[in-house]
Amino acid sequence: MRILLTNDDGINAPGLSVLEDIAKELSDDIWIAAPEEEQSGKGRAISLTQPVRTRKVGAKAWAIAGTPSDSVLLAMQDLMPDAPDLVLSGVNRGQNLAEDTSFSGTVAAAMFGMQLGIPSIALSQAQSFRERGSLPWDTARAWGARTLKPLIDLGWPKDVVINVNFPDLEPEDVRGIQITRQGARDETIIHTDRREDLRGNDYYWIGYKGKLSKPDAGTDLRAIYDGFVSVTPLHVDLTHEAFLKKLRESWQS
């Protein structure tokens, strides 16, 4: 099995090394195309108004001066001799749960792989649940292949991306694996922090509040809160089927 690795944290991110360790338990034919610099939060952006440069960093590895989606596209159309059998994106530094998935570069790279016809999985390691700065990479490393192997054996529909999140626990404390649906937080955790530079001008940092919500059972959020690995099938179709039906029935033409 030929596996393409990518991420949104950048070519030098520790999570990419963890992902490579996971991939080596699945195959010895591993290729890497990841952004030159961190691209967190860039979602499904592709570079249409500027050239994208590549830098070879290994026999089967490139740094891409672009987005996660750029990296997957270039790898599959120009850099690799043949298409991969699987795209793995991550391991992201921090969870990608609930509404995070809509702007996650990690998930976006997997979605682009799916769009190009390749089974794709996004992987993220939850952080800072136990305490500020907690980030147990060994958990993703220990639970990665044991989570992916059953998925690969089973397979999934062509329009589905698998989103895997590992809890902020040591490997031996993880309670197992749960199959989940995408959750929703009861309030936004993204916020702005206004500051002032030395010339008296305002500037802003955008970031996350470390506040837990009260998620429903069966959701990705609940699984991570409860100490389980979360496996969620996602797809790009954003249609709200229930309201679509109501809208069609009530629309006056």
Image: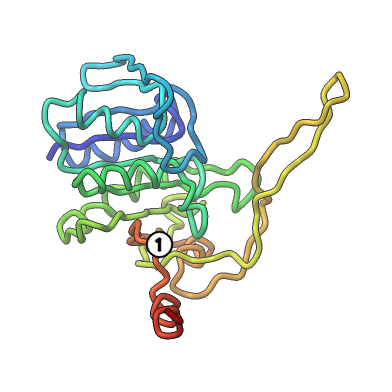
Query: What residue is shown at x 46% (from left), y 33% (from top)?
Result: 9
Residue lying furthest bottom? 249
Q: Is residue 32 above or below residue 120?
A: above
Residue 40 percent across, percent down from the top left: 50, 37
Of 249 and 78, nearer the camera is 249
Query: What residue is shown at x 64% (from left), y 61% (from top)?
Result: 212
Residue 10 percent across, percent down from the top left: 43, 28
Corner quadrant of residue 54: top left
Query: What residue is shown at x 42% (from left), y 51% (from top)?
Result: 171
Secondary structure of the residue carrying numbered label 1: loop
Q: Which residue is mark 1?
A: 238
Q: Quick check: 100 left or right of 66?
A: right
Of 244 and 27, nearer the camera is 244
Residue lying furthest right? 200
Q: Quick check: 97 left or right of 145?
A: right
Q: Is residue 41 above or below residue 162?
A: above
Q: How is the image coloured?
A: rainbow
Residue 232 percent across, percent down from the top left: 36, 61
Q: Is residue 50 above or below residue 24?
A: above
Query: What residue is shown at x 41% (from left), y 42% (from top)?
Result: 44
